[in-house]
């Protein structure tokens, strides 16, 4: 089979138009999908009325899945492979812990030493309007830098901090804060990461990075801010306007993404995500 692809933007992404994920898929069709994933950075499958098991099974074809043990409160109670991104209140009426997940530019699990290869996000429920997600092409952003800037950042490491570290001690207590800090120590990652499959260089930053290794926050901030601003310019970005039953996979090794809060928070937005483990990268460092 030759896949029918439709490009989603100039920067990145393609829609796979003729695949039904409820049906068995041959190795050769999956090989074409994987090739398209490496080429386009994002693949969108529309109208996929799949079960949770089918979501997990398809995701496994991309590699071993994370069981989200570093995010125990956000994972699905019956399916540890599924991470909830939802504003549906908890059974006791308290707000969902994951209602603001992904609201800044980031790449998944960069605050671990085995950052994600890819993530497959399925849209279950959407508000009437909005609830969009932005994606940015970090290979394109790197390529567009001057040779001088490429030299300057070549050996830098950014310190990535998990968003779960930002817990409210007054509400959650000191013990919970310490538990979360222990589960998620700061991780130094190369600012320029070589994609393990395509061999291409990409910026590997985002808003979870507050400083460079061996530099202070004050020293690091201007360059981090510049690189993040540069990388998320409109020409490097695709805006995903979700429809129910969309399944979208992105390559975390060469893209950033951000969930926008561009919707009425009283309306339900419910997404479920699998996370495909990547190759080891980075090391534990001091806060
Ligand atoms: C995420 O960052 O994984 C969630 C993105 C979204 O909800 O749009």
Image (cartoon, grey):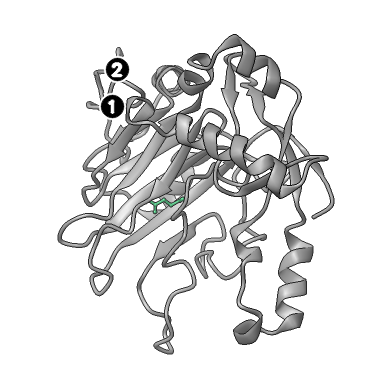
To which residue does mark 2 refer? 3
Q: Position of residue 245 (x, y in %)?
A: 25, 49
Determine whether 192 is above or below 92 in the image.
Answer: above
Residue 249 placement, left or right of 212: left
Quadrant of the image occupied by residue 68: bottom right
Residue found 29% across the figure and 20% down from its top: 10
Residue 152, percent from left and from top: 69, 20
Q: Tell me if mark 2 has few (under 14), some (14-19) or many (20+) residues whose alpha carbon lies within 10 angstroms of its own.
A: some
Residue at 57%, 70% in the rendered image: 73
Is 191 in front, or is 128? Answer: 191
Q: Is mark 1 within 8 Å of ligand 1?
A: no
Q: For residue 83, which numbered disc appears in the image?
A: none
In this picture, is 39 found above or below 232?
A: above
Of residues 232 and 257, which is closer to you in this image?
A: 232
Task: Indicate the quadrant containing the C terminus: top left, top right, bottom left or bottom right.
Answer: bottom right
Residue 167 visible at all = yes
Q: Residue at x 39, y 65 (%)?
A: 86
| Residue in front for this viewpoint, 173 or 279 | 173
Q: Secondary structure at mark 2?
A: loop
Check contact, mark 2 vs mark 1: CB within 8 A. Answer: yes
Which circle marks residue 16 in the picture?
A: 1
The residue furthest bottom is 92
Left or right placement of residue 242 versus residue 101 in this view: left
């Amino acid at each position: 089979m030759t896949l029918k692809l439709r490009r989603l933007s100039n920067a990145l992404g393609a829609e796979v138009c003729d695949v039904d994920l409820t049906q068995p898929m041959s190795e050769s069709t999956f090989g074409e999908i994987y090739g398209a994933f490496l080429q386009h950075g994002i693949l969108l499958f529309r109208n996929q009325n799949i079960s949770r098991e089918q979501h997990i099974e398809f995701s496994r074809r991309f590699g071993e899945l994370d069981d989200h043990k570093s995010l125990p409160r956000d994972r699905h109670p019956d399916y540890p492979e599924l991470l909830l991104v939802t504003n549906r209140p908890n059974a006791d009426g308290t707000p969902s812990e994951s209602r603001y997940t992904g609201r800044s530019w980031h790449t998944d699990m960069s605050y671990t030493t085995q950052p994600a290869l890819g993530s497959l996000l399925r849209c279950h429920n959407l508000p009437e309007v909005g609830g969009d997600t932005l994606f940015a092409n970090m290979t394109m952003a790197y390529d567009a830098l001057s040779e001088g800037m490429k030299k300057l950042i070549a050996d830098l490491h950014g310190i990535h901090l998990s968003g779960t570290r930002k817990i409210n001690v007054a509400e959650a207590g000191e013990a919970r804060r310490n538990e979360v800090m222990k589960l998620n120590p700061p991780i130094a990652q190369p600012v320029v990461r070589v994609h393990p499959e395509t061999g291409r260089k990409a910026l590997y930053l985002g808003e979870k990075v507050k400083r460079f290794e061996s530099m202070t926050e004050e020293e690091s901030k201007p360059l981090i801010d510049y690189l993040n601003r540069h990388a998320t310019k409109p020409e490097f970005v695709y805006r995903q306007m979700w429809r129910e039953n969309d399944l979208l996979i992105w390559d975390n090794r060469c893209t950033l993404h951000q969930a926008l809060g561009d919707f009425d928070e009283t309306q339900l937005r419910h997404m479920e995500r699998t996370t495909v483990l990547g190759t080891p990268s980075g090391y534990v460092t001091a806060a």
